[in-house]
Amino acid sequence: MKTRRQATILDLINEYPIETQEELLYRLKENGFNVTQATVSRDIKELRLLKSLSGDGKYRYTSISNSVIDAQSNINGFFNSSVISVKAAQNMVVIKTLAGMANAICASIDSMDLKGIIGTLAGDDTIFIVCADNNAAEKLTFDLKKHL
């Protein structure tokens, strides 16, 4: 069921300009999947879906490959348009974003498999990154600020 649902999600985002989880949830229900918003959220994370700017100036869900090149390209675009600040706090990096963009940016960072990162956590507009040590956090902060 999960595999079929996730395949349907990929088909839906390729067919429709889906902008929100609610819209994706609605489309899934139209296709016979009675799931919760929490399930859709987990599927988005597992599928590593991102929101990218479409030609009409709106953000929509898209899928990316797991290559570092694609991830780097996506992180550049997201950082330019969505990140408010990047700050180190000891061995952590805190990224403030526009509302609703933290998960997409965090997924891009996760897919880059950067050295020194132990784990990430995204909310609606804030990302916490735990680094191996203070030096790794400072280096990551410096590297991420280049994208602003």
Image (cartoon, grey):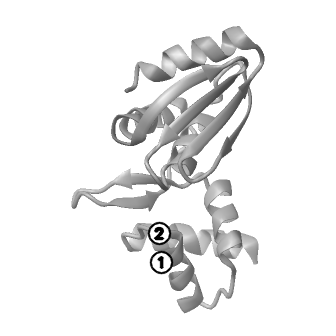
Q: Amino acid at mark 1?
A: Glu
**Badge 2 density bin: few <14, some 14–19, many ≥20, Cα 10 Å:** some
- Image quarter where the N terminus lies is bottom right
Q: With 28 as the anchor, is 58 left or right in this view?
A: left
In the rendered image, the vertical position of residue 135 relative to residue 6, given as above or below: above
Q: Nearer the viewer, residue 38 or 11?
A: 38
**Where is residue 28 drawn, in percent x and y?**
57, 82
Residue linked to disc 1: 23
Q: Tell me where residue 76 sits by quadrant.
A: top left
**Where is residue 124 drawn, in percent x and y?**
56, 53
Q: Tell me where residue 148 sits by quadrant.
A: top left
Q: Nearer the viewer, residue 95 or 118?
A: 95
- Label 1 vs label 2: CA separation? 5 Å
**Where is residue 117 drawn, in percent x and y?**
71, 25
Q: Amino acid at mark 2?
A: Thr
Residue at the outermost top position? 135
Q: With 143 as the anchor, is 81 left or right in this view?
A: left
**Where is residue 88 drawn, in percent x and y?**
61, 20
Q: Tell me where residue 9 sits by quadrant.
A: bottom right
- Would you say the residues marked 1 and 2 are in contact, meaning their CB atoms lie under 8 Å apart? yes
Q: Residue at x 64, y 65 (%)?
A: 41
Q: Secondary structure at mark 2?
A: loop
Residue linked to disc 2: 20
Q: Residue at x 72, y 12 (%)?
A: 134
**Badge 1 density bin: few <14, some 14–19, many ≥20, Cα 10 Å:** few
